[in-house]
Amino acid sequence: MRLYGARGCGSAITEAMLAIAGRPHEFVDVGGFEQPGPARDALALINPLVQVPALVLDDGTILTETAAIALFLADGHLGLAPPCCTPERTRFYRLLIWLVANVYPTFTYGDVPERWVDTAPAELDASTGRRREALYRWLDGELCEPFALGPDL
Ligand SMILES: N[C@@H](CCC(=O)N[C@@H](CS)C(=O)NCC(=O)O)C(=O)O
């Protein structure tokens, strides 16, 4: 498999899962992909949204979207997610999708607000930041220890 990712980005989630599962893969570092250049061009060929993570499977299938990749990897490796048909698995589905559906967009629109609005980008930055804080505060109340869902990874 080939993972397109960059330091400091959410592709670390996929990297961690691949490492824990012991799945051999090549890491294609597309650091700087937010700016025009070869890294962006390479990533755009794989993911038209030009986002990481993007995973190319051995048969050439392209998989994007963190939650889809996480579920795909969890399907192939026991222990990456709670066992099927347990209450923990149900909570896992909820929190996984909740994170990518709610938290990720605060970065999408807040990281470089000038991409989305011509006026008052600082306000968009501030409001997405407040939204993210509220989301994380709710999440904080949902999490167990030592792992998100309890004693197991
Ligand atoms: N919906 C995607 C979002 C991925 C995403 O936004 N990744 C960030 C890096 S952590 C990115 O590529 N941002 C650049 C952009 O959105 O243009 C997912 O869940 O994987």
Image: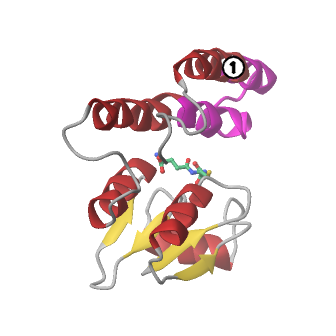
Asked if 55 appears above or below 13 in the picture, the reply is: below
Residue 23, located in which quarter of the rendered image? bottom left
Q: Is residue 107 left or right of residue 25?
A: right
Image-quadrant location for residue 116: top right
Percent x, y of residue 49: 47, 56
Please state which of residues 135 and 43 is positioned toward the viewer in this rendering.
135
Outermost residue, front side: 151
Left or right of residue 124, residue 148 in this image: left
Task: Place residue 87 in its image quadrant.
Answer: top left
Q: Is residue 143 magenta?
A: no
Query: Is 98 or 60 nearer to us in this picture?
Result: 98
* Residue 135 image offset from top left, x and y in percent: 59, 19
Residue drawn where x is 45% and y is 69% of the image: 21
Quarter placement of the N terminus: bottom left
Specify the segment rendered in magenta.
103-128
Q: Is residue 107 magenta?
A: yes
Instruction: Name the spot of residue 33 as percent of width and height, x first.
Output: 67, 65
- What's the residue at 66%, 55% (across, down)? 9
